[in-house]
Amino acid sequence: MKRILRGHHLLCTHGFQGMGYSTEFVKVMADIVGEIRNEELDFPIQVVQSFDDACQACPHKGRSACEKSADSNDHVLSLDSKVLHHFGLKQGDIYMKSALISITARKVKPEDLDHLCEGCSWLEYGVCKEGIGKLRENVLV
């Protein structure tokens, strides 16, 4: 099994609580999140700045860009870029899930999301900061 995840989805998987853009998107994201959170699974993840496994079920997925709004594609690309830079990852490279979880726990504090996820409509719910906090508690012991 190999997953393809865009940069900012590396953060979303830790805060996901079942909210989403459509029923199908929520189902696909829940499957991805279940695999990420399953401590018994380790698998390769290709990190991208483009459509990924979650995007395939998004109702805003256009032919080559996010079409949620006029500036949404530029916005999600900037989120991806900020996360990859913060993590020290290269676009297109493949990393093991366990390594990405470790990097996330070490390099991201809940308050970092104010910058990394600036402008994200889900940030205001607080679930992402809560998820990163729990990840850090579980991994950095």
Image: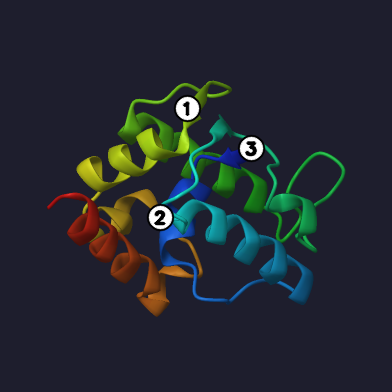
User: What residue sits 51% from the left and 69% below the top?
Assistant: 121
Q: Rounded to the nearest whole Å, what is the CA distance between mark 1 and mark 2?
A: 22 Å
Direction right: furthest residue: 63
Give amino acid for label 3.
Ile
What amino acid is labelled 1 in the image? Tyr
Q: Which numbered mark, 2 or 3, is in the foreground of this view? A: 3
Residue holding disc 3 = 4
Question: Could you tell me which secondary element the residue under label 2 belongs to?
Answer: loop
Q: Are marks 3 and 1 in contact (CB under 8 Å)?
A: no
- Local crowd size for mark 1, using a 10 Å CA cut-off: few (<14), some (14–19), many (≥20): some
Q: Position of residue 45 (x, y in %)?
A: 55, 34
Residue 15 falls in image quadrant:
bottom left
Secondary-structure class at tag 3: strand
If you read the primary sequence from the N terminus, does the residue marked by circle 1 or circle 2 appear first?
Answer: 1
| C-alpha separation, residue under disc 2 versus residue under disc 3 | 20 Å
Residue plotted at (78% across, 58% down): 57
On residue 117, the disc is 2
Query: 82 and 99: which one is in front?
Result: 99
Residue at horizontal 47%, vertical 27%?
95
Disc assigned to residue 95: 1
